[in-house]
Amino acid sequence: PGAVTGTVGVKPTYGGVSRYGLVALANSLDQAGPVTRTVLDAAMLHDVIGGHDPRDSTSIQQEWPSFTEAARTAGRMVEPTKTA
């Protein structure tokens, strides 16, 4: 557990990170998620690996708010940024 090892682990929402390339052990449970030393590091890595992947039919196609921004504001609600 993270409390023993001093790490932060994130299990992304189903479809939030592509499962393309993962070896299926239990289809609905297989997900890739960051394990880091800090919450901010985990948020930054999730921003990189998360998002829609056309090679994964289960990946979510909607825009996600920035996890990094949420971590930097200590989880306070932040208005999503508009992209053109």
Image (tube, rainbow, N blue to C red):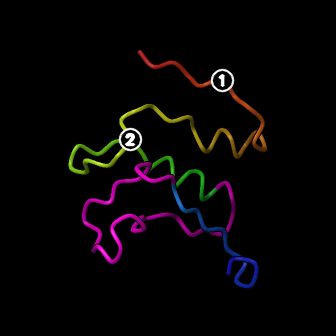
> In what quadrant of the picture does the N terminus appear?
bottom right
- The residue most toward the left is 55
Q: Which residues are magenta?
A: 13-40
Whole-percent x, y for residue 17 in the image:
41, 53
As drawn, 70 above or below 56: above
As drawn, 45 above or below 8: above
Instruction: Report the residue at 45% width, 53% height from top.
Output: 14
Residue closest to the eye, 73 or 13? 13
Residue labelled with disc 2: 60
Whole-percent x, y for residue 39 in the image:
68, 58
Any magenta on residue 22? yes
Instruction: Report the residue at 51% width, 56% height from top.
Output: 12
Q: How far is the residue under mark 2 from the one under mark 1? A: 20 Å
N-terminal-most mark, 2 or 1: 2
> In what quadrant of the picture does the C terminus appear?
top left
Residue labelled with disc 1: 79
Instruction: Report the residue at 51% width, 18% height from top.
Output: 82
Q: Are marks 2 and 1 in contact (CB under 8 Å)?
A: no
Counting the numbered discs, the total is 2
Going by the numbered disc 1, the residue's amino acid type is Glu
As drawn, 16 above or below 10: above
Q: Secondary structure at mark 1?
A: loop
Any magenta on residue 15? yes
Q: Decide if residue 45 is on the left or right side of residue 6.
A: left
